[in-house]
Amino acid sequence: ISLKGLNEFQIRQILNLAYQDGGTIESDDKALIVKEKELLVKKDGMLEIVNFKEEIDDIGGLSNLKKWLRRKSTIFKDLDHAIKFGVDVPKGMLIVGMPGCGKSLTAKATANLFEIPLVRLDVGRLLGKYVGESENNMRKALNLAEAISPCVLWIDEIEKAFAGIGGTIGGNEVTTRLFGHFLTWMQEKENTVFIVATANNIDNMPPEFLRKGRFDELFFVDLPNGDERRAILKIHLKKRNKWNSKIDTIALIQATEGFSGVDLESAVKDAIEECFIKKLKDVSTENLLESIKRTKSITNTLGERIK
């Protein structure tokens, strides 16, 4: 299944490289296949290949979402047997919620967990100036995603991508047709393209988009609670080798009420930068609290919208 979408020459090349590398062809050689598929995407230009190093453990909180993804990864890592056993191929998920709370990070971590390429569909890039060109580009992009599958197809801020659905003139007509084509493809697809759609607000999305059958699951991502904030702060401090047991996480949790994941990362980066400039060896609770005071959280900037 991993070699799907590649021609005979590309497959021979991969098998030769894998054999030269260790005398045998093993599951670890998936990286060679991913690389070949990346070249295929770059050559076509309809989709954007996304390089990532984010892992599932880089996500603080969101325990239900992570548990669900681990279940699906078991299927994706053994697709041949899963399909033979009668398991339906996972379709994908829609993640809705606050900006800066881990939606994009989850898309990257999903591809890493599944050990498959991550490609982004930018609907704006598909819009053409001639009649029928946009729809043709959409078909090409979805065909390419199918050709290189298994892969994760990421559509970021999908509510903006299909803005103006239901309009009667100009660009809205084109967008509505694109959306209709995309919905039909989602409903009927029986391939190994796993869709990760992210959105900040789905109030204006048509109800048929949200019904079962399009996605396997819909997740809401809220501002992190106290335990989640502690986990996020720990992740970012450990990533920069600045975590120590003397840091008072309770004080930090109390000071970061209403902070998003991105706000917390920003506060940690700012504190470490300040310590470097002041030539301090370690980052203390006080350093972090000072940085938190300087950080303008999403609740301050988008308070009314969040309510």
Image (cartoon, rainbow, N blue to C red):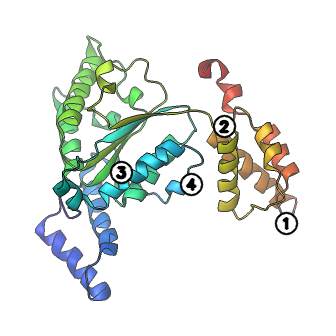
Residue mark closest to the camera, 2 vs 4: 2
Query: Can residue 284 be seen from the camera position used here?
Result: yes
Q: Position of residue 85 (x, y in %)?
A: 19, 55
The residue type indicated by label 3 comes to Lys
The residue type indicated by label 4 comes to Asp
N-term-proximal mark, 1 vs 2: 2
Q: Are marks 4 and 1 in contact (CB under 8 Å)?
A: no
Q: Nearer the viewer, residue 51 or 237?
A: 237
Please tell me which residue is depicted at 57% across the width and 39% down the height of the picture.
Answer: 101
Q: Which residue is under mark 3?
A: 72
Q: Which residue is under mark 2?
A: 225
Query: Residue placed farthest to the top in the image?
Result: 168
Q: Quadrant of the C terminus?
A: top right
Dot 3: element:
helix
Q: Which residue is under mark 1?
A: 281
* Residue 296 vertical placement versus 69 (above, below): above
Rounded to the nearest angstrom, the CA distance separating label 1 from label 3 is 43 Å
Q: Position of residue 273 (x, y in %)?
A: 77, 55
Rounded to the nearest angstrom, the CA distance separating label 2 from label 3 is 26 Å
- Which label sits on residue 58? 4
Dot 4: element:
helix
Q: Position of residue 34 (x, y in %)?
A: 31, 64
Please tell me which residue is depicted at 28% across the width and 24% down the height of the picture.
Answer: 175
Query: Residue placed farthest to the front in the image?
Result: 85
Q: Are marks 1 and 2 in contact (CB under 8 Å)?
A: no
N-term-proximal mark, 4 vs 1: 4
Residue mark closest to the camera, 1 vs 3: 3
Dot 2: element:
loop
The residue type indicated by label 2 comes to Asn
* Residue 192 vertical placement versus 24 (above, below): above
* Residue 4 vertical placement versus 127 (above, below): below
Please tell me which residue is depicted at 70% across the width and 47% down the height of the picture.
Answer: 230
